[in-house]
Amino acid sequence: MPAGSLTMDSVATVLGISAEAALPATGVIDLERVEAVDSAGVALLLARKRRAGVEGKSLTFAHLPPSLASLAQLYGVEDLLAAEPS
């Protein structure tokens, strides 16, 4: 579960760590502990979603921070990052 920031300053590190990690068995990435997101964070989540598709797996996100939801809407990718139904 990601925590803290998903911003330009942290995304390269997170991407490096997550590149080798398996996708969650639940098919859900919980973003409840994410405090800050910018466009780099959106790109990271889209990359994870793309990887899941390549691997033939489903991936959704839970507890999207309001800033992430706003950016996703601004970029027209809100359907790709839609939160898991509650």
Image (cartoon, rainbow, N blue to C red):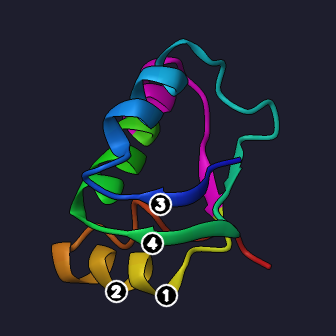
Write down the residue under mark 1.
66
The amino acid at mark 1 is: Pro
Across and down, in percent, residue 20 comes to 54, 12
Residue sitting at x 49%, y 87%: 66
Mark toward the start of the polypeptide (4 vs 3): 3
Across and down, in percent, residue 21 comes to 62, 18
Give the vertical position of 58 relative to 34 (above or below): above
Q: Tell me the mark number nearer the camera, choosing from 1 and 3.
A: 3
Mark toward the start of the polypeptide (2 vs 3): 3
The amino acid at mark 4 is: Ala
Write down the residue under mark 2.
70
User: Badge 2: how crowded within 10 Å, few (<14), some, or many (20+)?
Assistant: few
Residue sitting at x 32%, y 34%: 12
Query: In this image, 34 relative to 40: left or right?
Result: right
Residue at mark 1 to residue at mark 3: CA–CA distance: 13 Å
- Is label 2 in contact with label 1 (beta carbons under 8 Å)? yes
Mark toward the start of the polypeptide (1 vs 3): 3
**Highlighted range, magenta:** 50-61
Residue sitting at x 41%, y 75%: 68
Write down the residue under mark 3.
5
Give the vertical position of 72 relative to 55 (above or below): below
Mark toward the start of the polypeptide (1 vs 4): 4
- SS class, disc 3: strand
Across and down, in percent, residue 38 comes to 29, 67
Residue at mark 1 to residue at mark 4: CA–CA distance: 10 Å
Front residue (pair 37, 52) = 37
Residue sitting at x 34%, y 86%: 70
Write down the residue under mark 4.
36
- Is label 4 in contact with label 3 (beta carbons under 8 Å)? yes
